Amino acid sequence: MVAGPTRPRVVVSTHPLWQIRLRYGLPRYLLYATCAWGLAASARFALAPPHGGRGAVLRSPAAPSDLGTRAFAAIFARRYLSWDAASPQASGGSLAAFQGPQFEAEFGRRIPASGQQHVEWIEVVQARQPAPGRDVYTVAAQTDSEGLLCLSVGVARLADGRLALAGYPAFVGPPGSDPAWSPTHSSAVEDASLATVVKRVLRNYLLPSRDELAADLTPGAGVSLPPLALRLLSVQRLSWTQDRRSVEAVVQTEDARGAQYTLAYELDVAIAQGRWEVSAVQMDPDT
């Protein structure tokens, strides 16, 4: 007998729908993941590029509050403005430490044939930073011959940390100012008990009398007594600050020689167990 031809069979199998979707969607998901990884890597290199292990180290630029650059400018201004015609070599030698080959001798300063000038006091009153690593200071100097002078001095901090003048100095005007200002939003203190405590605290603070003062202070109050003894003559004005946590007292005082001063003190106040106490007078000695 001859076997007949084999008939093809159709097998029907069942699979969960999520497996079917995953099988046919997997290539697309892999493509999405590759794109996302590439974008993340590009963002990382843009925000924080890698640094070579042997790359150059750059110094951060000095800020205008750098004490070294401020002192450097003040020292130069004092020497530049001080001279004595009787000792011209000494006057010029005081600038030798700042001299550079790109500057004229003594920075172009020529002292007169006679006379002298001394600096009585000097202070940095303004600072700006026109470029990284370069600071420009306005130095106010009180001289005995020309009065108050303001000198603009540029200072550069070099890559190795040393300081150098960044150009010739310049005589400039002082920083702008207006007449004395006082706040207009303050309201008068109407609490008689608070006014009494403030007056007593200021009297003992100015004498000074630490033991008497302690009776009106909060526990742990930081108060530093002034070395100049003053007598409280009167309280001219007593007003609240804007946050109403402190009061400002304008007082008339007198020292042992009879000199009188009108002064303003700000006192931090608080109520403890029904009575007013003071936690600070004008300043915090611990900051």
Image (spheres, helix red, strand yellow):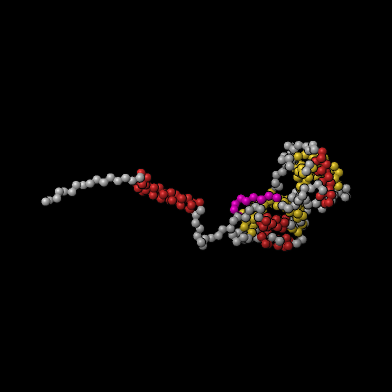
Say above or below: 90 vs 273: below
In this rendering, position of residue 169 left or right of residue 273: left
Q: Which residues are magenta?
A: 125-133
Residue 11 image offset from top left, x and y in percent: 26, 46
Magenta span has 202?
no
State the residue in front, 253 or 275: 275
Q: Assess whether residue 132 is covered by the magenta stretch.
A: yes
User: Residue furthest toward the left?
Assistant: 1
**Could you tell whether 27 is left or right of 139 in the image?**
left
Instruction: Count all numbered tags in the image, as a single digit.
Output: 0
Q: Position of residue 5 (x, y in %)?
A: 16, 48
Q: Residue at left 70%, top 57%?
A: 75
Residue 116 image-quadrant placement: bottom right
Q: Residue at x 73, y 42 (%)?
A: 245
Relative horizontal placement of residue 262, taking residue 61 as reference (left or right): right
Residue at image position (82%, 40%) is 193
Residue 66, image quadrant:
bottom right
In terms of depth relative to the viewer, which is nearer, 211 or 52?
211
Residue displayed at 78% across by 45% down: 277
Residue 165 position, x and y percent, is 64, 57
- Residue 168, can we see it? no
Please state the horizontal and vertical placement of residue 30, each as a whole percent of the image: 39, 49
Outermost residue toward the right? 257
Foreground: 84 or 58?
58
Main SS of the magenta segment?
Answer: strand
Is there any visible trace of residue 200 in the rendered image?
yes
